[in-house]
Image: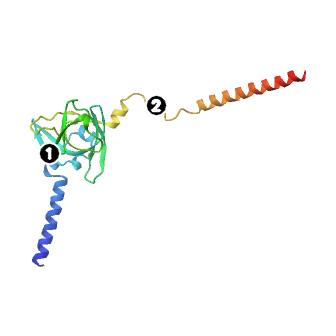
Amino acid sequence: MGIRSRVTAGAILALASAAALAQNPAGCASVQFSDDVLARFPRAPDACLDVISRGGQDYAVFNARLVEVRGNTLRVRFKLPDGSFGPTQSVTPPRDFRVLINGTPTRVSDLAPDQELKAYVEVSRPVMALEPADSGQQLVVVPLVAEERVAANSGPAMPATAGPAPLFATLGVLLACAALSLRTVLGLRALRRK
């Protein structure tokens, strides 16, 4: 094998291993996510980009896409290794909180759908922090709520359809009106004959 072939093979191998490490670095592989975190985000170990420690806690770093902003509640989906996105999660940071978007401090209320956010999920409990506008600022941790749980707690579910009762009631009223009209017409004809 010539020198050129060896260099090319070595470069390809180096790129492949760098891509594998960038997808799920050693820090992510060594961290143990709690059952509560995995219940809300089962593919967290796969989607983890890095692990950082702040204030004695380990946080897994993820990329997230903003789905919607309602007041100061953000609906986000974590990016998975294959480029798809996980289930929708909701977080509600403080109203005056600012996040870093493309190097610019941005208020939560000014965020727009489809923006990419850097998210930090605590590995031991289901809470999340967004990347603060100032790197020296402490992480503001808020509960991470799976959308299925939000929907389940929003009150009793309405039936999928109203059933046939309204249709039968409407049909009954129409038939009663038709019978009354027919009776009136027949009564008027009988009066004219006399």
Mark 1 vs 2, N-terminal side: 1
Secondary structure, mark 2, is loop
Number of callouts in the render? Answer: 2
Give the residue number, with chain letter if any, for mark 1. 51
Point 52% across, 35% down: residue: 161
Q: In this rendering, would 189 be left or right of 93?
A: right
| Label number found at residue 89 | none
**Residue beneath the point at 63% across and 29% down:** 170
Closest to the observer: 107 or 41? Answer: 107
Where residue 48 sits: x, y (%)? Answer: 20, 47
Q: Give the percent coordinates (x, y) of residue 82.
A: 27, 54
Q: What secondary structure is marked by label 1?
A: strand
Picture residue at 23% right of the left edge, 50% below the top = 46
Q: Within the image, what quadrant is residue 101 found in?
A: top left
Q: Which percent across, then down, holds residue 88?
A: 31, 41
- Whole-percent x, y for residue 168 in the image: 63, 31
Horizontal side of 190 relative to 11 (left or right) equals right
Q: Is residue 130 visible?
A: no
Residue at mark 2: 158
Q: Amino acid at mark 1?
A: Val
Is residue 89 in view from this perspective? yes
Nearer to us in this view, 74 or 19: 74
In the rendered view, would you say 169 is above or below 82?
A: above
Nearest the viewer among 175 and 13 is 175
Horizontal side of 193 relative to 48 (left or right) equals right
Label 2 sits on what residue type? Met
